[in-house]
Amino acid sequence: MEKKGFVQVYTGDGKGKTTASIGQAIRAKGHKLKVCFVYFFKNPKAVPYGELKVLKGLGIETVGFVPHHPHFNKNIPAEGIREECLEALEAIKEIFKKGYDMLILDEILIALRDGFLKEGEILELLATKPESLEIVLTGRGATRKIIEKADLVTEMKKIKHPFSRGIKGKEGIEY
Amino acid sequence: MEKKGFVQVYTGDGKGKTTASIGQAIRAKGHKLKVCFVYFFKNPKAVPYGELKVLKGLGIETVGFVPHHPHFNKNIPAEGIREECLEALEAIKEIFKKGYDMLILDEILIALRDGFLKEGEILELLATKPESLEIVLTGRGATRKIIEKADLVTEMKKIKHPFSRGIKGKEGIEY
């Protein structure tokens, strides 16, 4: 791996953001890079995420923060979420010290979009990442400044999605 | 998995199409689905694709067709490529019979874009797939009719890419 790690951003309303970040983890793992997969707003106790099982099995570190999102669980007060997100940022800064080659922050941009994190907080996180660390951010809600800071940005644009026809997520496809 | 397998299409000029298809394979594998990853225009003898190594290691069938693309290798005559692509279509129809839950056809749409396959040939392939098979097509060059036939389509739109600044593909990131 080259000296400089890039900041990659996968945003937009189409399917493929988390999916691409999983692929990126796998590709890096294939070259024996040290990978950490951090995910936001996922509760593996409630949903059997197929990808997390496989990533773990391959020796990729997986770490979850803020398992509940108030949008999906009305019983969760939104107030606590900001604190959980700030704690996650601190924990990510600790992860920075562990010598990973690639760090994925899956759905962190949802925290930004929904006001649980501020743009400046994510920019500061990116500014303090180790030089050689490749970092991958996913989620709807990338801002102009985050795009400016990133080296590689893809917008996953929904052209067609079965959810729009009221079809539910399928095991092995959506989780 | 539900009875009906979808046709998924990842197209557009941004990074994330093949990467998402790898993620999709991993997710399916996490649910013990039977997955086959078919790739076009890749020569693993020349490029050490990290992802192929990992997919194989997980017991995912990987099959390559048409290893050379005339765009990247000027010594390859374009005439033979159409025949190789047609042979690939026949082989894929054989793969249809093997009871896979998910079949990825990575970069098959490049064959279409570059005139090695015709739109009607790919539409016919999709029309003959087993009902329950989830099929994933990637590559620039999805046509309107292929999008119509698909259940899920995401356009990966390049907002920013280091290649545009003349930076070369990095091991573990691009392959």
Image (cartoon, coloured by chain):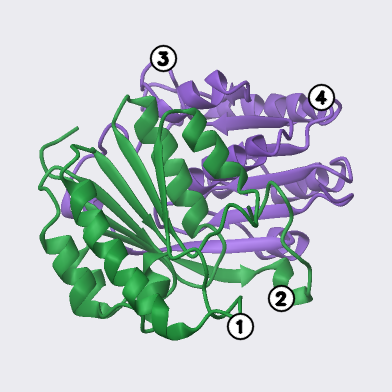
Chain colours: A purple, B green
Q: Are marks 2 and 3 on the same chain?
A: no
Q: Position of residue A145 (x, y in %)?
A: 72, 62
Residue B155 lies in quadrant: bottom left
Say what amino acid the circle numbered 1 marks: Lys
- Chain for disc number 3: A
Q: Nearer the viewer, mark 4 or mark 1?
A: 1
Left or right: where B170 falls relative to B56 = right
**Disc 4/disc 1 C-alpha distance (Å):** 49 Å
For residue A45, which numbered disc appears in the image?
A: 3
Please say whether residue B29 is visible from this viewpoint.
yes
The answer to whether the residues at label 2 and label 3 have Cβ atoms under 8 Å apart is no
A90 or B82, which is in the foreground? B82
Q: Nearer the viewer, mark 2 or mark 3?
A: 2
Q: Position of residue B162 (x, y in %)?
A: 73, 67
The answer to whether the residues at label 4 and label 2 have Cβ atoms under 8 Å apart is no
Q: Position of residue A90 (x, y in %)?
A: 77, 27
Say what amino acid the circle numbered 2 marks: Ser
Q: Are marks 3 and 4 on the same chain?
A: yes
Residue under label 4: A94
The image shows residue A72, relative to residue A149, as above or below, that is: above
Which class describes the residues within 10 Å of circle 1: few (<14), some (14-19), or many (20+)? few
Q: Residue at x 23, y 38 (%)?
A: B100
The image shows residue B45, relative to residue A35, as above or below, that is: below
Please say whether residue A111 is visible from this viewpoint.
no
